[in-house]
Amino acid sequence: ELFLDDKGQKISKSKGNGLTIDEWLTYADPQSLALYMYNKPREAKRLYFDVIPRAVDDYAAFLGAYQRQEGDWTNRLMNPAWHIHEGHPPKPEEGGISFALLLNLAAVANAHEKSALWGFINRYQPELSPETHPRLDALTGYALRYFDDFVKPKKQYRLPTEDEAKALSDLSHALGELPEHASPEEIQQKVYDVGRRDPYKTVQKDGSAGVGQGWFNMLYQVLLGEERGPRFGSFVALYGIINTEKLIGRAVAGELVSPPAA
């Protein structure tokens, strides 16, 4: 009775609604489930597949925050990581890559094996490996299963409008001016620079030109087949600038909506 489906109804095995604990552990680690249970443990919770990615990344965020709170026991004792690990949270792995980012990588890379995702990870951060980063290695497996079962069936790319296609082509050109191993921050700045155009341009409080969320929504919808996604500069850094240029070219050509016949 502690678990409800996404509509707030009691989970029923006969209906197949909602998500069982065993199913959660097929797609994410036990720590993410423990975090999800930590908040208001006596209240009924909506347990369904869409909550998993955020729980995984929130756990990593709390674990990282715990290390930064060294000596600050007021905040450490309020950190869920302290309670999940009974007062002894492990050190987070360096160079962490979010679960949301791995899901998007699985989508564009058309990957079916962890080794394929590790190929991109090693190009991005050569010092990482399954041996040195076992949690990240586990997350790659979870991401592949989650993507195949829940993300892939719902993905829906759309064609860019004429103006959007022009903006995407400009973005591809701007990315091409960067070195292949540019930082996520350098890439994100280019994304902002190209996005400062109508209808995405906004005016910030200090009067400078900003970029509205509509720019990023368009990128996610056209390039990733999603309504939202991770920070775009981080995605490009992981996937690779050259690969992203090719992805943009395919999107502008309409190949993501209707892949060419083999």
Image (cartoon, grey):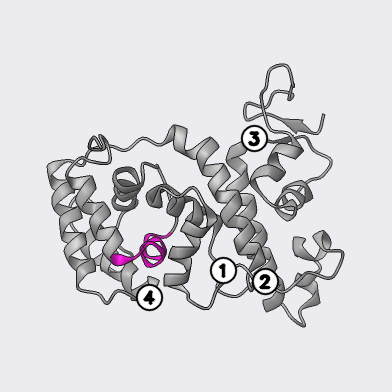
Measured Cα–Cα span from mark 4 to mark 2: 22 Å
> Whole-percent x and y of residue 109?
39, 52
236 inside magenta stretch: yes
Instruction: Count residues near mark 1 (Cα–Cα under 10 Å), then give few for <14, some for 14-19, many for 20+.
Output: some
Between the residue at mark 1 and the residue at mark 2, the CA separation in whole angstroms equals 8 Å
Relative vertical location of residue 92 with respect to residue 29 in this rendering, above or below: below
Mark 4 surroundings within 10 Å by alpha-carbon count, few (fewer than 14), some (14 through 19), many (20 or more): some
Which residue is located at x 60 percent, y 63 percent?
136
Q: In this view, does 119 lie to the left or right of 220?
A: right
- Separation of residues labelled 3 and 2 (CA atoms): 27 Å
Q: Earlier in the sequence, mark 1 or mark 3?
A: 3
Residue at the disc numbered 3:
48
Q: Are marks 1 and 2 in contact (CB under 8 Å)?
A: yes
Residue that label 1 marks = 96
List the single residue furthest toward the front: 262
- Mark 2 secondary-structure assignment: loop
Q: Quadrant of residue 45?
A: top right
Q: Residue 24 vs residue 212: left or right?
A: right
Residue that carries the numbered disc 2 in the rendered image: 92
Q: Quadrant of residue 236?
A: bottom left
Q: Give the range drawn in magenta.
A: 231-241
The residue type indicated by label 2 comes to Pro
Above or below, 70 against 133 in this view is below
